[in-house]
């Protein structure tokens, strides 16, 4: 008995192909039942996300035989009639286990170190477990994968930091303010990126958001979507007495905020710290404002620079993570040696006499 | 073990402060990126030995050990070290120890100068319960000011990194600017309150004949210090002085305190034996 994985991911197949093989959650238990009924697997988990579709299985068949059979199953199940080459990959032990651990730790993700895949993998495992499609081998492998992912998260920097402009802005805000819930945000310009940044701040606790735009209708629409309030564009400087974070993304050809305009506003704020995120190109905010005490100005290049540095940091951690994974895979394979063909462990065999 | 005196104990404490300082340099070079208990325990070991040293001295003298400049300095350092250990337990303030240990080590080495610790005669330089309370409260105030200065230094370091867009501002596990400002302000307020109490108690102490209270160097120096901290707190809390300027004032005030504390004590008729 061994664990194999067959599937396709963002690394091997374009999204048009991945979506053809995607499994709806409701159909997964039946698909696993079919696999077992056909004698191809004794245990199975289906992981189907926007970036990958994978079947992890414990199979009594020789790996090559199992690969061909599961490939055929996938094609038949999804009624796929096109050509299929290297897009579908198949891995046997120990590579299958290494792949599973890498996926759980976010090392195989589009954004290295991302954490969403951990939740998705857990959900896929829970679905299979609840429907009794897992056994000793996959239970152990998946539990180890989750533990390894947690271990890697605490011991390395692979999940550290923000790799998008929005999350970099949030991280900056959290470095300046101890609790975002107590601070107000002003969104100047109702663009997509400023909306995403405002939502990212909201997800970290910001409760009060004001939106201003040259078009009052757009300001009102975005304000409603964010649960905030719209402010007339000619009155946005007045908001500076209350807000602590401003996200600016207008289409203005010239800066709308410069040092001369901001200095009196800072006096009204009693010099409380102010974070200015300027994601407009050309820039909305004159760089000279950063010379003012308590003003922290970051433009889109700065935020992208932060995201790039974090990505570089994560990539430097990959080798360390892979070493941890190699050790854990070896340990799991060693432990699995003592499992019988029906998956019973040594302890269980002794108890049963 | 009779040869092992309180000064030997304090020397060991200073050694641990030195080790903590060296470790702190490595933490600083790494950008305070990873939580680390090692430095905390090095400092804790130093403070434990320091406490033992002061206890031994106190038991020998049968009084609170704040009777000469060596004892006053060690008491101040002990307050600084102990407060640092306590505050470091708060979320994200663990690296306070990294900023405090260099101060403890430097002043500890200075305190070990033999001239600061003359042999005690039958009549210590300053004695009595009220005098002990005065000295202990004042020195605790200095300790609080010291920790405020350390927190202010952390604030300025973090502020600089954020201003010039250094990635280590984000990578480091230092607290947020707002939290550092709050800690700095509260420590300065505690120090100011203790200083006020200490000075009030000191004004009630019996004085030697012919020694003018209001013309005494130490009294004038203390009043100046009190006014400096009062001005700093009021300007920051009520007149919108920026956190950066507040931090700079606190650091400069504490440096002034350190540089002039001993000379004013020596020049003070009220504090000389």
Image (cartoon, coloured by chain):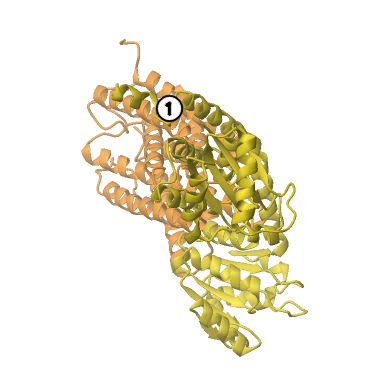
Chain colours: A yellow, B orange
Q: Nearer the viewer, residue B215 or B34?
A: B34
Residue A335 appears left or right of B120: right
Image quarter in which the N terminus of chain B is found: top left
Residue B90 appears at what percent x and percent y? Answer: 39, 47
Q: Residue B169, can we see it?
A: no
Give the letter of the chain under mark 1. Answer: B
Residue denoted by label 1: B116
Horizontal side, residue A340 vs residue A269: left or right: left
Please indicate, yes or no, whether residue B7 appears anywhere in the rendered image: yes
Give the vertical position of A140 relative to B195 (above or below).
above
Q: Position of residue B48 (x, y in %)?
A: 35, 28
**Depth check: A149 or A353 in front?**
A353
Q: Identify the image quadrant of residue B55.
A: top left
Instruction: Say left or right for B103 vs A72.
Output: left
The image quadrant where one finds the C terminus of chain B is top left
A189 to B99, vertically: above or below: below
Disc 1 packing (10 Å; few <14; some 14–19; many ≥20): some
Between B42 and A76, the one lying in front of the other is A76
Q: Residue at x 64, y 48 (%)?
A: A72
Residue A212 rendering spot, x and y as whole percentages: 60, 82
Q: Please determine whether, in this image, residue A214 is positioned above or below residue B182.
A: below
Residue with the most extreme front position: A38
Please give the name of the residue rendered at 65% of the width and 50% of the height, measured from the top-left corner: A8
- Helix, strand or loop at mark 1: helix
- Front in this rendered view, residue B196 or A71: A71
Question: Residue B134 appears in which quarter of the rendering?
Answer: top left
User: Residue shown at 65%/88% (left/top)?
Assistant: A215
Residue B44 position in % (x across, y down): 39, 31
């Amino acid at each position: 008995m061994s664990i194999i994985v067959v599937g396709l991911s963002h690394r091997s197949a374009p999204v048009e192909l991945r979506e053809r093989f995607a499994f709806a959650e409701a159909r997964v238990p039946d698909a696993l039942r079919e696999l077992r009924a056909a004698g191809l697997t004794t245990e199975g988990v289906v992981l189907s996300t926007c970036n990958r579709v994978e079947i992890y299985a414990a199979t009594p068949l020789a790996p090559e035989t199992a690969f061909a059979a599961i490939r055929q199953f996938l094609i038949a199940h999804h009624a796929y009639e096109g050509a299929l080459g290297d897009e579908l990959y198949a891995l046997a032990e120990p590579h299958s286990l290494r792949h599973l651990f890498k996926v759980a730790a976010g090392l195989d993700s589009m954004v290295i170190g991302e954490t969403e895949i951990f939740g998705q993998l857990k959900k896929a495992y829970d679905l299979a477990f609840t429907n009794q499609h897992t056994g000793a081998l996959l239970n152990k492998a998946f539990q180890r994968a989750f533990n390894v992912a947690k271990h890697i998260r605490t011991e390395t920097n692979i999940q550290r930091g923000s790799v998008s402009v929005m999350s970099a802005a949030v991280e900056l805000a959290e470095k300046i303010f101890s609790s975002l819930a107590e601070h107000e945000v002003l969104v100047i310009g109702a663009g997509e990126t400023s909306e995403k940044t405002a939502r990212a701040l909201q997800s970290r606790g910001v409760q009060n958001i004001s939106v201003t735009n040259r078009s009052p209708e757009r300001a009102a629409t975005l304000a409603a979507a964010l649960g905030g309030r719209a402010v007339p564009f000619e009155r946005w400087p007045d908001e500076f007495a209350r807000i602590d974070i401003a996200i600016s993304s207008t289409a203005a050809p010239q800066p709308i905020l410069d040092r001369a305009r901001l200095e009196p506003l800072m006096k009204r704020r009693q010099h409380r710290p102010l974070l200015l995120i300027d994601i407009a190109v050309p820039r909305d905010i004159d760089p000279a404002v950063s010379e003012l005490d308590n003003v922290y100005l970051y433009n889109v290049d700065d935020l992208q620079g932060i995201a790039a540095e974090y990505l570089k940091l994560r990539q430097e951690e990959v080798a360390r993570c892979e070493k941890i994974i190699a050790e854990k895979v070896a340990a799991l394979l060693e432990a699995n040696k003592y499992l019988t063909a029906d998956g019973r462990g040594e302890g269980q065999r002794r108890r049963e006499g | 073990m009779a040869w092992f005196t309180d000064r030997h104990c304090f020397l060991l404490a200073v050694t641990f402060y030195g080790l903590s300082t060296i470790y702190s340099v490595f933490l600083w070079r790494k950008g305070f990126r990873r939580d680390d208990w090692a430095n905390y325990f090095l400092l804790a070991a130093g403070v434990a030995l320091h406490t033992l040293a002061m206890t031994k001295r106190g038991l020998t003298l049968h009084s609170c050990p704040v009777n000469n400049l060596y004892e006053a300095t060690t008491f101040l350092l002990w307050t600084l070290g102990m407060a640092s250990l306590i505050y470091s337990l708060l979320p994200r303030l663990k690296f306070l120890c990294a900023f405090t240990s260099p101060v403890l080590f430097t002043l500890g080495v200075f305190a070990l100068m033999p001239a600061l610790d003359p042999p005690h005669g039958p009549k210590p330089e300053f004695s009595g319960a009220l005098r002990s309370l005065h000295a202990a409260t004042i020195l605790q105030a200095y300790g609080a000011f010291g920790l405020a200065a350390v927190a202010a230094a952390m604030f300025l370091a973090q502020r600089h990194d954020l201003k010039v867009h250094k990635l280590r501002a984000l990578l480091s596990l230092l607290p947020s600017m707002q939290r550092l400002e709050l800690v700095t302000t509260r420590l300065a307020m505690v120090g100011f309150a203790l200083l006020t109490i200490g000075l009030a108690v000191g004004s009630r102490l019996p004085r030697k004949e012919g020694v003018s209270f209001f013309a005494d160097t130490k009294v004038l120096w203390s009043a100046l210090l009190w006014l400096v901290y009062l001005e700093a707190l009021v300007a920051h809390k009520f007149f919108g002085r920026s956190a950066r300027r507040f931090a700079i004032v606190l650091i400069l005030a504490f440096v002034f305190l350190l540089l002039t504390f001993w000379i004013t004590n020596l020049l003070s008729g009220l504090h000389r034996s």
